[in-house]
Image: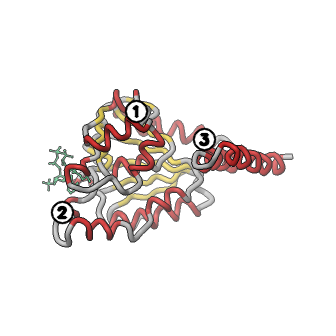
Amino acid sequence: MSDFETILYEKRDGTGYVTLNRPKALNAYNIKMRDELFQVLAAVRDDPDVKVIIFSGAGEKAFCAGADLTEFLTAPPPVAARQVRFERDVWGRFLSIDKPIIAALHGYVLGDGVEIAGCCDIRIASEDVQFGTPEMGLGIITAAGGSQTVPRIVNRAQALDVLITGRWVIASEALKMKLVNRVVPRDKLMPTAEGIAGRIKSFDSEAVRYVKQAVTRGMDMTLEQGLSLETSLSRRVNTRTR
Ligand code: COA
């Protein structure tokens, strides 16, 4: 599982560590990374030994500086290049994972970086984090899930402000708008993520998965449907433990 070119994957004590690993290009998201992420997401989803997942970026400067511009803005034209990205439903694959995913974010978190972070459940950032969606300036829209996940994390007005203007958001503002759950010094980033992972792993993993499902699937339902989902998930836990 460590044979990837753009991603490091490691499994330790029930945690799956997924590290974007193109530090010289600030972990820019290229087609190879898309393909490898697609594979690794299935692996963490289907491996019963993995109870929780931590996403991070290699190197000092960035979690991910967005789409790889060397692929993106050269021939074939941007629209065709972008189409290639839709050939693997990476974002759908994120949604198929009912285990908790923690994002440990540092430095630049741009474009696809924001979108990967948006597919995670708990976002921890270091003090040097800077979020941005440069898509508008490139004549395209945020379309790797971000136009849907960001307004579900922050509010609609905040999402539109950031996505339309492409303005950057630093750690203090990200915390204020709840784009991240916690901001910590850089050297505390992984220890904090691991501390949260450890706490989650101390709980019954099926109950953890059900509560994630209740919240994430329920958010897209009417209240009545959501309550019914909650009842059926809680019955499964209660029946099992009786
Ligand atoms: N795609 C491909 N390569 C990228 C990249 C990207 N999105 N972002 C950075 N890199 C590369 C740079 O080309 C540079 O490579 P080099 O050392 O071979 O010249 C290396 O990463 C370091 O980047 P650099 O620009 O020197 O770092 P910086 O600290 O001065 O600036 C950024 C950092 C993020 C502000 C700047 O790199 C940038 O604006 N990147 C593009 C962001 C973007 O528009 N992403 C697309 C979103 S849809």
On screen, residue 62 versus residue 157, left or right, reads: left
Residue drawn at point x = 56 percent, y = 47 percent: 100
**10 Å crowding of disc 2: few (<14), some (14-19), many (20+):** some
Give the mark nearest the N terminus, 2 or 1.
2
Q: Nearer the viewer, mark 2 or mark 1?
A: 2
Give the mark nearest the N terminus, 2 or 3.
2
Q: Position of residue 216 (x, y in %)?
A: 58, 47
Question: Type of residue at label 2?
Answer: Leu
Residue drawn at point x = 46 percent, y = 35 percent: 192
Q: Eyeballing the image, is 65 above or below 189?
A: below
Question: Quick check: is the Cβ at mark 2 less than 8 Å away from ligand 1?
Answer: no
* Whole-number angstrom distance, CA of label 1 to CA of label 3: 18 Å
Which residue is denoted by mark 3 in the rendering? 200
Can residue 1 be seen here? The reply is no
Residue drawn at point x = 57 percent, y = 40 percent: 198
Q: Position of residue 144 (x, y in %)?
A: 38, 57
Can residue 78 be seen here? The reply is yes
* Whole-number angstrom distance, CA of label 2 to CA of label 1: 36 Å
Q: Position of residue 187 (x, y in %)?
A: 36, 33
Q: Nearer the viewer, mark 2 or mark 3?
A: 2
SS at mark 1 in the image: helix
Which residue is denoted by mark 1 in the rendering? 188
Question: Type of residue at label 1?
Answer: Lys
Which residue is denoted by mark 2 in the rendering? 73
Q: Quadrant of the N terminus?
A: bottom left
Give the mark nearest the N terminus, 1 or 3.
1
Question: Type of residue at label 3?
Answer: Ile
Q: Nearer the viewer, mark 1 or mark 3?
A: 3
